[in-house]
């Protein structure tokens, strides 16, 4: 995905379960990812060239091994759109 500028994710329902979108540049789920919280929005735009983990360390877009959603699990996550832009 390193050739792209942004990744946009849009939910098809209101965020009622602390939904976040996470991108890992390491093979272990227990490492620190770039995390994007939806908050009260249904949309997140990820600047793929400027991703950072919680410690401010750069996430490498040319080596993304795990990409996915996280939530508290009490409500379904409905995904409406996911798209990449140059």
Image (cartoon, rainbow, N blue to C red):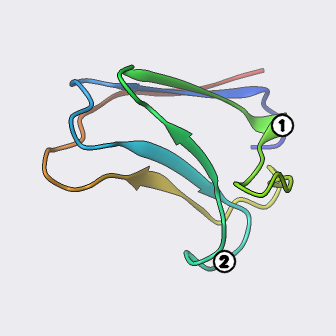
Tell us which disc is closer to us: 2 or 1. Answer: 1
Q: Tell me residue 41's x, y (percent).
A: 39, 19
Quickly name the residue at label 2. Answer: 27
Name the residue rendered at 43%, 31% in the picture.
38
Crowding at mark 2 (Cα within 10 Å: few <14, some 14-19, many 20+): few
Q: Farthest residue in the front direction?
A: 55
> In the picture, residue 33 is in which quadrant?
bottom right
Q: Which of 23 and 15 is in front in this view?
A: 15
Task: Examine the rendered structure and indicate whether residue 2 appears above or below residue 34.
Answer: above
Task: Examine the rendered structure and indicate whether residue 63 appears above or below residue 17.
Answer: below
Q: How many marks?
A: 2
Task: Examine the rendered structure and indicate whether residue 65 appears above or below residue 58.
Answer: below
* Viewport quadrant of the C terminus: top right
Task: Examine the rendered structure and indicate whether residue 17 appears above or below residue 16.
Answer: below
In the image, 25: left or right of 78?
Answer: right
Quickly name the residue at label 1. Answer: 50
Crowding at mark 1 (Cα within 10 Å: few <14, some 14-19, many 20+): some
In the image, 34: left or right of 63?
Answer: left
> In the picture, residue 83 is in which quadrant?
top right
Lower sequence index among marks 2 and 1: 2
């Amino acid at each position: 995905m390193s050739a792209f500028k942004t990744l946009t994710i849009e939910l098809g329902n209101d965020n009622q379960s602390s939904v976040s979108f996470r991108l890992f540049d390491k093979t272990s789920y227990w490492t620190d990812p770039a995390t994007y919280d939806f908050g009260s929005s249904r949309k997140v735009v990820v600047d793929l060239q400027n991703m950072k983990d919680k410690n401010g360390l750069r996430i490498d877009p040319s080596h993304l091994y795990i990409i996915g959603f996280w939530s508290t699990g009490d409500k379904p996550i409905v995904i409406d759109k996911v798209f990449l832009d140059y």
